[in-house]
Image (cartoon, grey):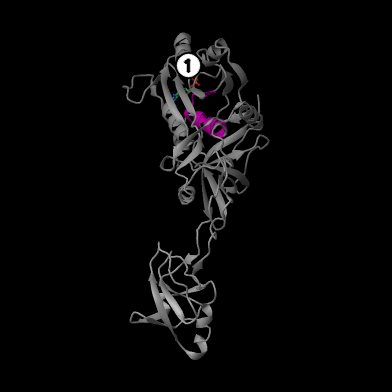
Amino acid sequence: MISVDNALKIVLHDIKTLGREGVSLTGSLGRILAEDIYAGSDIPGFDNSAMDGYALKAQDTAAISRTGPKVLTVIEDRKAGYISRRAIKNGQAIRIMTGAVMPKGSDSVVMVEGTKRHGMDSVKIFKPAKRGDNVRRRGEDIKKGERVIAKGTRLTCGHIGLLASLGKAKVLVTRPPRIAILATGDEVIDVDEKLKPGKLRSSNTYTLYSQVLKCGGIPKNLGIVKDTPDMLEARLKRGLDCDMILTSGGVSVGDYDLVKLILAKMRTDIRFWKVAMRPGKPLAFGLIKGIPIFSLPGNPVSSMISFEVFVKPAMLKMEGANGSSAKMVDAVSEENITKRKGLRYFLRAITRWEDGIYLTRTTGPQGSGILKSMALANSLIVLPEDDEDIDKGVRVTVQFLD
Ligand code: AMP
Ligand code: MG
């Protein structure tokens, strides 16, 4: 049986990053940037006022604290968006609004609260200014030529604001991976079918579908097939126009575990089968006609965990995402945990921050069919292969689910 780390290495080795496409800025949220973004201009593009107030020469206000308020001549009123025609000389000020270009000759702004206007032409300044006060310098946010956002970044609202400021109405992002999802099993029916004795609804179809969406992929639901070789083969073929195929069920050692059989028949290059983990042990990965295929276990929790551990990193590599490794923290276990040596465990847990440390406990019974354990969890307790039973109070590694 292969270890989780080695299995993941094989997966990542076999996955290639997809091509890129241009999207409009409004359609780019959550997409992975496929180009480095360099600033074509300074931001802000000019020295401007950070406040509503009066632009002036700081030296004119230097004596205020000793000799009292100073009266200056107002030579102009300046809104944002327009350039002052006149330059300030000693003893003069220009009324200025936030974002307006600093007039020639001025070096600082006294905010309006520190002044009193007298008629059109003069203002009394109560507060002294130092050079640069309330001035936003050209390029203080971004310098022309600077690399602002790196290729491989998943675009957030803040990035989109920067891109807009830089005039990037279109950006290059990685094409989203199309992922086929196929559930198997004679007992498995769809969500809107009537339940009959011995049948159960396919939760895997929908957990996998939403997991794919969450990772930025485009799911293609191939539905549910019975454990019949011909049907399975025919349906799998419908996934061959995708970038990756996920099947669930039929990969353990039962008599009806046909997925392996059909994969072999379709000349799949099986790279591994069975990983030393719990849950999720019966998992196969290979390349079918060059397309990566994961045959995930049928048990609902195993299927979700296998996705987290293998499919998600594979999808992120397809998308060319940087810094995509899961957020891990140290936490103190609030309970005793029984563990068998040799397997890596992924226990569904609730982890919280309390008095400066993370505390973690499982979500209750951890059977691989107990989907509630996953639904209640915000994290996974990851116990390495070599660990045995864990006592309450011991530090464990926790991986947050997002
Ligand atoms: P299998 O791997 O096919 O032996 O399935 C293992 C367990 O998972 C069985 O109890 C199945 O009934 C269950 N199972 C298989 N497929 C699904 C599915 N799509 N949704 C929910 N449970 C499933
Ligand atoms: Mg089955």
> In x, y percent, where is residue 228?
46, 10
> In x, y percent, where is residue 99?
43, 64
Decide: is 60 above or below 193.
below
Number of numbered markers: 1
> In x, y percent, where is residue 305?
53, 32
User: The N terminus appears in which quarter of the rendering?
Assistant: top right
> In x, y percent, where is residue 279?
55, 30
- For the residue pair 399 and 323, the one nearer the viewer reads as 323
Disc 1 crowd, CA 10 A, few/some/many (<14, 14-19, 20+): many
Segment colored magenta: 293-316
On the image, numbered disc 1 is attached to which residue? 236
Q: Is residue 208 visible?
A: no
Question: Please, what is the three-letter code of the amino acid marked with disc 1?
Answer: Leu
- For the residue pair 370 and 171, the one nearer the viewer reads as 171
Q: Is residue 347 visible?
A: yes
Judged left or right of residue 308, residue 195 is left
Dominant secondary-structure state across the stretch colored magenta: helix
Which residue is painted at 63% across and 39% down in the image?
389
**Extreme residue toward the right, this view:** 386
Query: Tag 1, which secondary structure?
Result: helix
- Membership of 313 in magenta stretch: yes
Judged left or right of residue 7, residue 232 is left
- Membership of 157 in magenta stretch: no
**Extreme residue toward the front, this view:** 85
Decide: is 257 above or below 244.
above
Q: Is mark 1 within 8 Å of ligand 2?
A: no
Decide: is 183 above or below 137.
above
- For the residue pair 54 and 218, the one nearer the viewer reads as 54
Which residue is painted at 48% across and 20% down in the image?
241
Q: In which quarter of the image is residue 294?
A: top right
